[in-house]
Amino acid sequence: MESNVKTYTFAQLAPGQKEQFTVTVTEEKMAQFYALTGDCSPIHRDAAYAAGRGYPGRVVYGMLGASMVSTLAGVYLPGAHCLLHEVDAKFVRPVFIGDVLTVTGTVEECNETFREITVKYSITNQDGKKVTRGLYKAGLAE
């Protein structure tokens, strides 16, 4: 197991508990996401097309940003014992190549009956503007 992965157990989690990390969106990440998904929409692949729609550059795939929820859940909150059950994402504003995203999650609820946590998360850019927000539910396979 990688050393930076948290290993919270259900008993160690409580409402209000928070974790966060930062990530920079790069050309390489965009290319890797395209290779994985095949999403060839010109808004993501063609700078001239994106500029023609009023954007300063290619728009980052919304799901590339939202995929950071997997990192938040599987590495940070709750970490290694996580099994995602549900993810909700609201895309508030576009993300662009070079943006530095801060991904923050806060435990909202710990459901003892189902041994499941609900985490409210937000992703903000380097200007402190929220770009994505939502909730996820995760069980713990401890």
Image (spheres, rainbow, N blue to C red):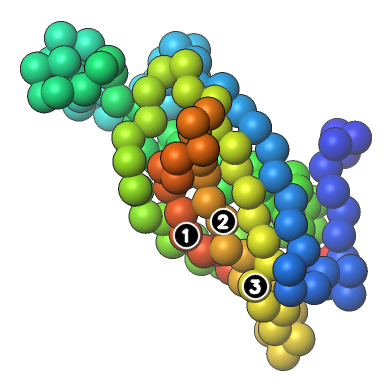
Q: In screen coordinates, is 112 left or right of 66?
A: right
Tell me the residue that label 3 is attached to: 108
- Circle nearer the N terminus (1, 3): 3
In the image, what residue type sits under mark 2?
Tyr
- Do tag 1 and tag 2 residues touch (Cβ < 8 Å)? yes
Task: Work out whether 3 lies above or below 132.
Answer: above
Q: Which amino acid lies under the numbered mark 1 shown in the image of this protein?
A: Gly
Disc 3 marks a residue whose amino acid type is: Glu
Of the numbered discs 3 and 2, the one sitting upstream in the chain is 3
Left or right: 44 with respect to 115? left
Distance, label 1 to label 2, CA atoms, is 5 Å
Mark drawn on residue 121: 2
Residue 98 in picture, x, y percent from top left: 47, 16
Task: Give the residue drawn at x 61%, y 28%.
Answer: 23
Q: How far apart are marks 3 and 2 (CA)?
A: 10 Å
- Choose top left, top right, bottom left or bottom right for residue 105: bottom right
Q: Which of 92 and 135 is in front in this view?
A: 92
In the figure, residue 13 lies in which quadrant? bottom right
Q: Where is residue 131 in the image (x, y as percent from the top left)?
A: 41, 42
Q: Is mark 3 on a helix, strand or loop?
A: strand
Q: Distance between the residues labelled 1 and 3?
A: 12 Å
